[in-house]
Image (spheres, rainbow, N blue to C red):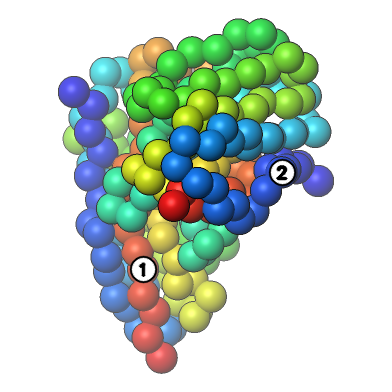
Amino acid sequence: GQNIDQPTEMTATEGAIVQINCTYQTSGFNGLFWYQQHAGEAPTFLSYNVLDGLEEKGRFSSFLSRSKGYSYLLLKELQMKDSASYLCAVIDSNYQLIWGAGTKLIIKP
Amino acid sequence: DVKVTQSSRYLVKRTGEKVFLECVQDMDHENMFWYRQDPGLGLRLIYFSYDVKMKEKGDIPEGYSVSREKKERFSLILESASTNQTSMYLCASSFPADSGNTIYFGEGSWLTVV
């Protein structure tokens, strides 16, 4: 079966750095997305990785290792508004999106 | 700006009622999706469509049907609502996935079946 694993919940302090991990076992791989979802709102796009390595976009970076079936989202200089759920999703060999259950990130002052 | 619009934000329906959830996108996307999202389960795909009048079952199609008569509109139908269909429903759209095209979501429809 296809599976994406993320931690259910993480807590971090305002101003700090947090890394949210995502491991996947899918039938093929054609890319990986990270989305942010604030409570009661729709998910919004953060990043897309299809090649190994780090993609940096402001305070957020996303890393991919295809050989390890592993990605992480790195959030720097955390702000209270970063409190949200972070969803990892993989495009499989049939170009279907497989979603993880999401990681709820709680930011404390 | 990209826009996916869902017709109803909050609905309360009775068991056995027929429920229509409408979704419209203004980006000329080929692909449209209906998901439901429940705590701890993440996004689960109900149905998707790659073209007008075309539909494919997702992971949990039982109890649901869909309609795509026009490219911009994708409707989700609950023929006879049940309490286990109480959930948040998300519509989404995208260009074909083979180029890593971003998927865009609507605001979500919170359905309570009593």
Q: Nearer the viewer, residue A60 or B83?
A: B83
Q: Nearer the viewer, mark 1 or mark 2?
A: 2
- Give SS at disc 2: loop
Verify CB contact (< 8 Å) between mark 1 and mark 2.
Answer: no
Q: Nearer the viewer, residue A46 or B67?
A: B67
Name the residue carrying label 1.
Answer: A105
B42 up-or-down from B80: above or below:
below
- Residue B91: give x, y in percent of width and height: 59, 37
- Give SS at disc 1: strand
Amino acid identity at mark 1? Leu
Visible residue check, residue A53: no
Q: Residues within 10 Å of mark 2 (few under 14, many from 20)?
A: some
Q: Chain letter of disc 1?
A: A
Q: Chain letter of disc 2?
A: B
Q: Residues within 10 Å of mark 1 (few under 14, many from 20)?
A: many
Amino acid identity at mark 2? Ser
- Residue B39: give x, y in percent of width and height: 33, 55
Q: Quadrant of residue A31?
A: top left
At horizontal 41% and vertical 26% (from top left) the residue drawn is: B63
- Residue A75: give x, y in percent of width and height: 42, 65
Q: Say whether mark 2 and mark 1 are on the same chain.
A: no
Name the residue carrying label 2.
Answer: B7
- Residue A68: give x, y in percent of width and height: 20, 35
At horizontal 47% and vertical 30% (from top left) the residue drawn is: B80
At horizontal 36% and vertical 75% (from top left) the residue drawn is: A106
Visible residue check, residue A59: yes
